[in-house]
Image (cartoon, grey):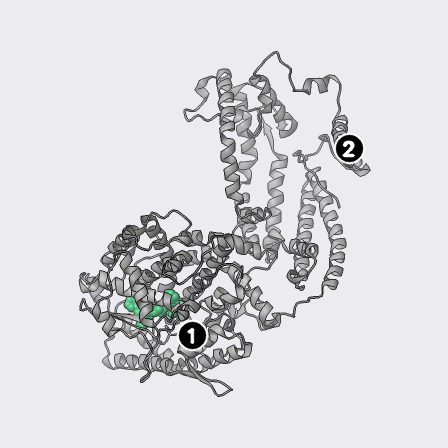
Amino acid sequence: MFRMISDIGTDAMKDEAKLARMNTLQSDIEGIYAKATVSFSDGQTLALEPGLTQLMASSRNYTKLQEAWIGWRDNTGKLMRDKYADFVTLSNEGVSSLGYHDTGEYWRSWYESPTFEPDLQKLLEELKPLYSNLHTYVREKLMDLYGRDKFPTSGQIPAHLLGNMWAQQWNNIYDLVIPYPDKTSVDVTPELKNQSYTPLRMFRTAEEFFKSLGLLPMPDRFWNKSIIVKPTDRKMVCHASAEDFYNQKDFRIKMCTDINMEDLVTIHHEMGHIQYFMQYKDQPVPFRDGANPGFHEAVGDTLALSVATPKHLQTIGLLNSVENDEGSDINYLLSMALEKIAFLPFGYLIDQWRWSVFSGETPKDKFNDKWWELRCKYQGVSPPVERTSTDFDPGAKYHIPSNTPYIRYFVSFVVQFQFHKALCEAAGQTGPLHKCDIYRSKEAGTKLGDMLRLGSSKPWPYAMEALTGQPNMSAKALMDYFAPLTAWLEKQNAGKQVGWQDACSNQRHAPLSANEQQAKKWLTEYNMAAQEVFYEETEVEWTYATNITDYNQQKQTEARLKLADFQKEAAANASRFDWKHFDDEQVKRQFSKISDIGTSALTDKNKLKKLNDLQSEIEGIYGKGKVCLGGNKCLTLDPDLYDILTSSRNYTELTLIWQEWRNVTGKKMKDKYEEFVRLSNEGVRELGYNDTGEYWRSVYDTPTFQKDLQKLMEQLKPLYEQLHAYVRKKLKKIYGAEHFPASGHIPAHLFGNMWAQEWENLYDLMEPYKNKAKVDVTPELVRQNYTAHRMFKTAEEFFTSLGLKPMPETFWNKSMIVRPAGRDVICHCFCLGFL
Ligand code: KAW
Ligand code: ZN
């Protein structure tokens, strides 16, 4: 507790005059922000709330939005730049007497974690693919509306088009991006207005939710002293806030409430602060605080996750009908993503900027450059007009002039999903997270209240564990919540260049060609060129697979790179066409496939080369793998080891070759494989997939693919188990029960197959009825002197008997159907189609 009492921040400033100067600067800066308005060329003048906020939310006029965006920055940030720089110096001086290097370090100390910064970075990385996919989907829709020529070639979205002055949340452009316009949408703003909701009624609605959980009602004083509408007779800082007066009974909210859904959410947010104040009011003063600042921000939002569900909105009469189908679900999740996912990079970068300013890394003349470096890189938004170092765009966001730390909101947006999940479990809800509504669950309320009452008496991991059963911040709950949307967005973005380059570019896109005739012509040319490139590449693959030499391996790598280049260029060319809006479905489908280029998407050429090298090396290790047992005879997989596996029943011998094969193949490629996986994932991430597995699964076009497989597996399991038990019993008799583990497993090398993947070579050991007809025709094939060629002909005859095509001349001339002597080949049968 003494630590907390000593933690007085900039008040520690020894020099009274400096302290006074700092406080004057701070209130000057805040004053500039609070008094700012924007005057438009048509004579209209608007304050931020409600005027500019509403304009940014509802106008779809590119130039009007731009005027508001620039005007706000000219009249806030730009006017406070000098004062802010002085303020930073004084603030650092203040905390230095407490032993902190700078104010950023001081602020971070509240989280009591040495790994705080890398932990945040890791979280952001985990969330990035989802954000990128959302960004790409939204960008596409906005390009359609405003024209591609307004968008930079580097991939960012102009920052004034996202329905919000700072592009921090995008829910106000929901109408432009609705996935299924005919399905349920949950914007209850019209209904709030219809039912003549007042700010007071909105506050009472929020309070009722807290009470339904058994949490505390807002006290009388709260209702008497809070300000919930913008006063008309004086200027007030409209940015919502909650205040604890530390006398255990006075708690208030100040807010300029507008009648809309966004403000209904904000009311829950602010009331969450009040609820926290009231729950910890009996703690000693130094502990009357959030477990960490992010926790304080997360309380109301956690409840709002329940409130926003269609089911709940229906319960409280704000939504008429709720359809329960995939389209409505996706509509809902997308609207939540515009609020929650869109915010994450913004929540992250504000203090990245401020920490770098406080630490001195970013000097005054780089304030604005650094700001846009972060905005371009993390959020993928670009300034609609050129910015210079006399601009000070950070100052256009309330929390900079008010000097309110911001990383707390990033933390909050992650942990609120962890809280939501824990409370849903407490409430006994078993469905998907995004449908859970904890309304009226006393169990959930008790769990939350218990955590809140701790205040800051314990380090936050303790509070986290009390609520969620584990002590860490984690993105998992959030990712689970949005899982169905993630899959859906990936599908929408298939064939798109997902994401953006780090730095914003001044160059704009050329407009898209809508000329379908021209596109068809291009497709014809593409097909001719592709056929040639594919042929060349396949020829080289074949040469390598049928003759493994270093030279052929190098040729193979070259050919693969050439193909990747070709595909990348084709995808880029295809993207000049507005093919998504073409009429001919087959043409659209071809374009979509041409754009879907997998790991070839790797922008970094060196990495692409490395990826291909690794792939060849790994294949080479496998292809050249030989088991050498004593003597000097080395055994190839096919046919030497296969022959032994098929016929040997010698436990020791089988063990030996099983182990050796793994030593000479898998073990040798492990490190290379690891790197291969990393690069491969990096490649498909440029297309917006989380990893290569996800990319591979995407070709099945089935959102429930993995679940479906799992179900099939479950259905098949009883039959497999019976077979397994039967085989085990027989093998035990042959090899002796002592070789079989008590867990019921069968040693993997006893199946007559190197990988135990098929067991037909055990047939003679398993035969149920010894003297009945057998179907193994191998002896007969041998007896009749079948050759490989004759076997192929026999197979061909079946195809032709169905009226299918015979194998062509070149097939018989060029195929390799027996192992050639004197060279290494990949014997794993494989088919190459030469186009
Ligand atoms: C946000 C948060 C939740 C839901 C939607 C949201 N959209 C955007 C945000 C993040 C952020 C923003 O607007 O950019 N939200 C806020 O600033 C809400 C205001 C606040 O409740 O967080 C308020 C900010 C504030 C701090 C200090 C002085 C004045 C305003 N915080 C508090 O009132 C507060 C009070 C006590 C303890 C902790 C916070
Ligand atoms: Zn808050």
SS of the residue at dot 2?
helix
Q: Please identify the residue farthest to the bottom as the structure is shown.
A: 43
**Residue 192, quarter of the rendered image:** bottom left
**Would residue 247 be seen by someone viewing this image from the given angle?**
yes
Is residue 243 left or right of 823 when viewed as pictured? left
Mark 2 residue crowding within 10 angstroms, few (<14) / some (14–19) / many (20+): few
Image x and y of residue 505, in percent:
57, 70
SS of the residue at dot 1?
helix
Spatial separation of the CA atoms under disc 1 and disc 2: 73 Å
Tell me the residue that label 1 is attached to. Answer: 394
Quadrant of the image where one finds ligand 1: bottom left
Image x and y of residue 52, in percent:
44, 78
Location of the N terminus by quadrant is bottom left
**Would residue 117 be seen by someone viewing this image from the given angle?**
no
Tell me the residue that label 2 is attached to. Answer: 800
Front-lying residue, 87 or 467: 467
Front-lying residue, 225 or 461: 225
Is residue 250 left or right of 362 when viewed as pictured? left
Front-lying residue, 114 or 181: 181
Front-lying residue, 722 or 314: 314
Image disc number at residue 610: none
Is residue 230 left or right of 673 when viewed as pictured? left
Q: Do the residues labelled 1 and 2 touch (CB within 8 Å)?
A: no
- Label 1 CB sits under 8 Å from any ligand 1 atom: no
Residue at the (50%, 21%) spot, across then down: 726
User: Mark 1 or mark 2: which is in front?
Assistant: 2
Image x and y of residue 816, in percent:
74, 34
Specify the amino acid type for callout 1.
Pro
Specify the amino acid type for callout 2.
Thr
**In the rendered image of this protein, does residue 324 appear above or below residue 301?**
above
Q: Please identify the residue farthest to the right as the structure is shown.
A: 809
Image x and y of residue 246, in percent:
20, 68
